[in-house]
Image (cartoon, rainbow, N blue to C red):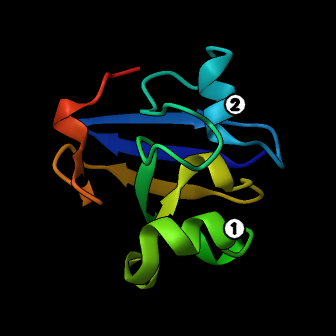
């Protein structure tokens, strides 16, 4: 089973997840706590994460990510709601990352 390490607000959340899991689905069912997310369909950008390790094993960015993240994809940013975890993964969710004027600090924490 893949091992996921989430760096967020000075904390590190580490957990094994089932292969082919979506982290937002797991967060919504209380199986992956603290992950920031909103709509779950790639529209709100609340789940924007920087992939620091394991990104090469993720599914390729889809049209939603290309439209919303644009050049940020090249810097390793992805929408957690649009990725499938198949291997070990490390990601960061930053409070002040801005996409189209939206800031994490103004978003509801889940």
Disc 2 versus disc 1: nearer the observer: 2
How crowded pointer 2 is (Cα within 10 Å; few <14, some 14-19, many 20+) is rated as: some
Instruction: Between residue 57 and residue 36, name the one nearer to us.
Output: 36
The quarter of the displayed image where residue 16 is located: top right
* Horizontal side of residue 39 vs 41, given as left or right: left
Location of residue 86 with respect to 94 vertically, above or below: below
Q: Earlier in the sequence, mark 2 or mark 1?
A: 2
Residue 99 got which mark? Answer: none
Location of the C terminus by quadrant is top left
Q: Give SS at disc 2.
A: helix
Instruction: Return the residue at label 2.
Output: 25
Percent from the top left, x then y, of residue 70? 44, 78
* Residue at 74% in and 54% down: 84
Q: Visible in this render: residue 37? A: yes
* Quarter of the image where one finds residue 40: top right
x 72%, y 49%: residue: 2
Q: Is residue 99 above or below residue 35?
A: below
- Residue 58's disc is 1
56 relative to 83, above or below: below
Q: Position of residue 61 (x, y in %)?
A: 65, 73
- Quick check: 9 left or right of 57? left
Foreground of the two, 100 or 109: 100
Residue placed most toward the observer, 73 or 3: 73
Quadrant housing the N terminus:
top right
Q: Secondary structure at mark 1?
A: loop
Left or right: residue 65 versus residue 13 is right
Q: Residue at x 49, y 31 (%)?
A: 38
């Amino acid at each position: 089973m893949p091992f996921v390490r989430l760096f967020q607000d000075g904390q590190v959340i580490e957990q094994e997840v089932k292969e082919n899991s979506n982290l937002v689905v797991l967060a919504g069912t209380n199986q992956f706590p603290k992950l920031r997310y909103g709509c779950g369909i790639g529209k709100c950008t609340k789940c924007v994460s920087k992939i620091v390790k394991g990104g090469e094993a993720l599914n390729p960015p889809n049209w939603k990510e290309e439209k919303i993240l644009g050049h940020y994809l090249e810097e390793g940013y992805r929408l957690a709601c649009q990725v499938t975890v198949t291997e070990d993964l490390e990601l960061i969710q930053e409070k002040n990352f801005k996409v189209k004027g939206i800031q994490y600090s103004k978003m509801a924490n889940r």
